[in-house]
Amino acid sequence: MRAVALAALLMTAILADRGAAAPAGLILHDVPREIPPLVFADDVGRQRTLEEFRGNVILLKVWATWCGPCRKEMPTLDRLQARLGGSQFQVIALSVDRGGPDAVRRFYAETGVRHFALFIDSAARAGLRLGLFGLPGTLLIDREGRERGRLIGPAEWDSPEMIAFLQSQILQAGTHRADGSQPIGQ
């Protein structure tokens, strides 16, 4: 009886240390992966890179206004940004629309998306460089700019399960070394 209680306590401690479970479809990497340099534009045409966002946990969404699953999930992603976005976490919604920023602005207005900035890659180079063969595609990026996981396809980004998972990732990101390991005592 005592052994069972001890095993349950140990399992609880292990699971608590790992954070919330990854939602269905999200593949977490054992070792963080380097991300190739990406160049995209903001709403006024300035060139931007992911490097500018280093220091935050990033959810990079590659999407398009003509993608049915993207259209459905973008409002949930907007609500996620409203809830968790700030100095520790940011959604970067990178549109691959050839229609440029105006197509994205119209979509944002139609759907009420208002909590994240407009970023565009009208040449769709980012998806290819990231190995995303279909839309939508999402990368979870750590504070050092490395890919921690990815999800291909749509998700309900503001679900309690997803929010709990991302909150655990934001908290854990502050305790990991650059090589992905945790400091002693963590």
Image: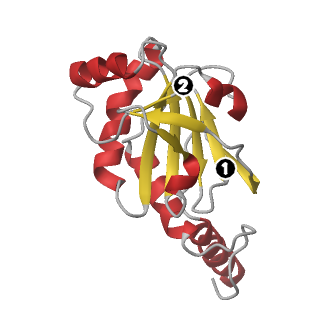
- Viewer-closest of 82 and 165: 82
* Residue annotated with mark 2: 136
Front-lying residue, 165 or 136: 136
The crowding category of the residue bearing disc 1, from other C-alpha atoms within 10 Å (few below 14, some 14 to 19, many at least 20), is many
- Measuring 42% from the left and 12% from the top, which residue is drawn there? 99
Query: Which disc number belongs to residue 147?
Result: 1
Q: Earlier in the sequence, mark 1 or mark 2?
A: 2
**Quarter containing the N terminus:** bottom right
| Residue positioned 49% across, 68% down in the render | 171
Q: Position of residue 34 (x, y in %)?
A: 74, 51
Residue nearest the observer in this picture, 122 or 27: 122
Q: What amino acid is found at the position of numbered circle 2 in the picture?
A: Pro
User: Which residue does the image show at 35% across and 33% down from the upper left?
Assistant: 44
Q: Is residue 182 visible?
A: yes
Q: In which quarter of the image is residue 100?
A: top left
Q: Which secondary structure lies at badge 2?
A: loop
Q: Is residue 132 left or right of residue 81?
A: right
Q: Position of residue 47 (x, y in %)?
A: 50, 38
Relative height, residue 116 to residue 173 (above, below): above
Q: In this view, does 100 lie above or below 35?
A: above
* Residue 42 location, quadrant: top left
Query: Looking at the rendered structure, which numbered label has been put on residue 31?
Result: none
Identify residue type, mark 1.
Answer: Glu
